[in-house]
Amino acid sequence: MVRVISGTAGGLKLQTLESESTKPTLDRVKEAAFSMLKDDIYGATVLDLFSGSGALGIEALSRGAEKCCFNDKNKACCDLIRKNLSHTKLEHCAEIFCSDYTEIITFFRKKDLKFDLILLDPPYAGGFYEEAIELISKNHIYSDYATIYCEHRAADELPEEIGVFSKVKTKKYGTVAVSIFRNEVD
């Protein structure tokens, strides 16, 4: 069972899908990762690009993010995100999109939306990280001093730089790792 770790919805349990294509972030990984991100959350506009159950975006909202756009191409995931947002009473500061990540990034560019914090937790075997960060960079859907969170297999080493983003930290938690990328404007 996945739960919200801290904030206004802290302790509430979230529903997840029983599926091979989704994998909930372990509580210990989420707790450690959000500790690393604590200065990036309050008042932030967040994009949870491969949302699954919405647990990462909901955690950010619970900890004080101003708004979160959730996206997952799986309709069942989008329905589950709605349920979890309603359960946590955070639906007022969320938008849900059900699109392929490449399409939604283009949509956000056309709408001139910018995100302070982007959460990437795609299926590990898909190899989406570099392409997603490149598209985010090329389409300029990030604000100055934006942060990208990438959850990936510990065995996968992400590049030091992707687009305008530089890796500033990687922490391993057993078979899972979290890498943080930043766009630090001079």
Image (cartoon, grey):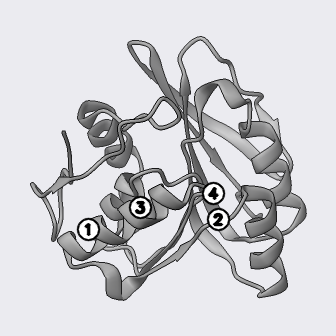
Percent of width and height locating residue 160? 76, 31
Q: Is residue 127 above or below residue 51?
A: above
Of the residues under marks 2 and 4, which one precedes in the sequence?
A: 4
Percent of width and height locating residue 179? 56, 34
Name the residue located 79 percent from the left edge and 77 percent from the top edge: 107
Give the residue type at disc 4.
Lys
Cα–Cα gap, marks 1 and 2:
22 Å
Assess disc 3: are there few (<14), some (14-19) or many (≥20) residues with their C-alpha within 10 Å of its C-alpha: many
| Callout 4: SS | loop
Assess disc 2: are there few (<14), some (14-19) or many (≥20) residues with their C-alpha within 10 Å of its C-alpha: some
User: On the rendered image, what quadrant is the N terminus found in?
Assistant: top left
| Callout 3: SS | helix
Labels 4, 3: front one: 4
Labels 1, 4: front one: 4
When asked about the image quadrant of residue 27, the answer is top left
| Callout 1: SS | helix
Give the residue type at disc 2.
Tyr
Which numbered circle lies on residue 145?
2
Task: Please tell me which residue lies in front, 65 or 146.
Answer: 65
Name the residue located 18 percent from the left edge and 65 percent from the top edge: 7
